[in-house]
Image: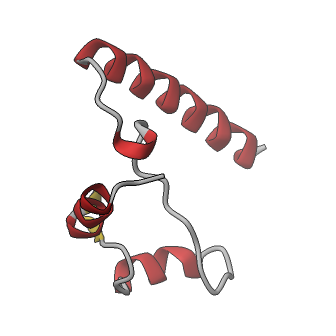
């Protein structure tokens, strides 16, 4: 379970990819444009590789990032086929 302070921090965070910024519970015209490509009324953007914001070492965080990027690349490859 997320602590109230961590949940507040998540809600105050700017989640960025490329030139698109997302915020929890705030509409984004850029995200809407991206999602229209998939003919959907909504979507989910996964932006982190440290679920629940647990403190970890920089090394562990980098390894988690590498695993995430590998899975992302595999997912993109499957969608193209």
Answer yes or no: is residue 17 visible.
Answer: no
Answer yes or no: is residue 71 visible.
Answer: yes
At x 20%, y 68%, the residue is 12
- Residue 50 position, x and y percent, is 40, 37
- Residue 5 position, x and y percent, is 24, 59
Would you place residue 47 above or below residue 45 in this image? Answer: above
Residue 42 sits in quarter: bottom right
Position of 4 compared to 33: left or right? left
Number of marks in the rendered image: 0
Residue 22 sits in quarter: bottom left
At x 30%, y 23%, the residue is 56
Position of 76 compared to 63: left or right? right
Identify the residue at the far right of this view.
Answer: 81
Would you place residue 48 above or below residue 61 in this image? Answer: below
Position of 19 compared to 63: left or right? left
Q: Nearer the viewer, residue 50 or 81?
A: 50
At x 35%, y 35%, the residue is 54
Would you place residue 51 above or below residue 37 in this image? Answer: above
Would you place residue 68 above or below residue 81 in this image? Answer: above
- Residue 17 position, x and y percent, is 31, 56
- Residue 66 position, x and y percent, is 43, 22
At x 35%, y 16%, the residue is 60
């Amino acid at each position: 379970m997320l602590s109230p302070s961590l949940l507040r921090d998540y809600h105050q965070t700017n989640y960025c990819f490329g030139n698109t910024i997302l915020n929890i519970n705030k509409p984004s015209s850029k995200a809407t444009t991206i999602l229209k490509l998939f003919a959907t009324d909504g979507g989910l953007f996964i932006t982190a590789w440290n679920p629940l914001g647990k403190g970890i070492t920089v090394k562990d965080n980098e390894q988690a990032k590498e695993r995430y990027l590998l899975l992302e690349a595999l997912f993109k490859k499957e969608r193209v086929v």
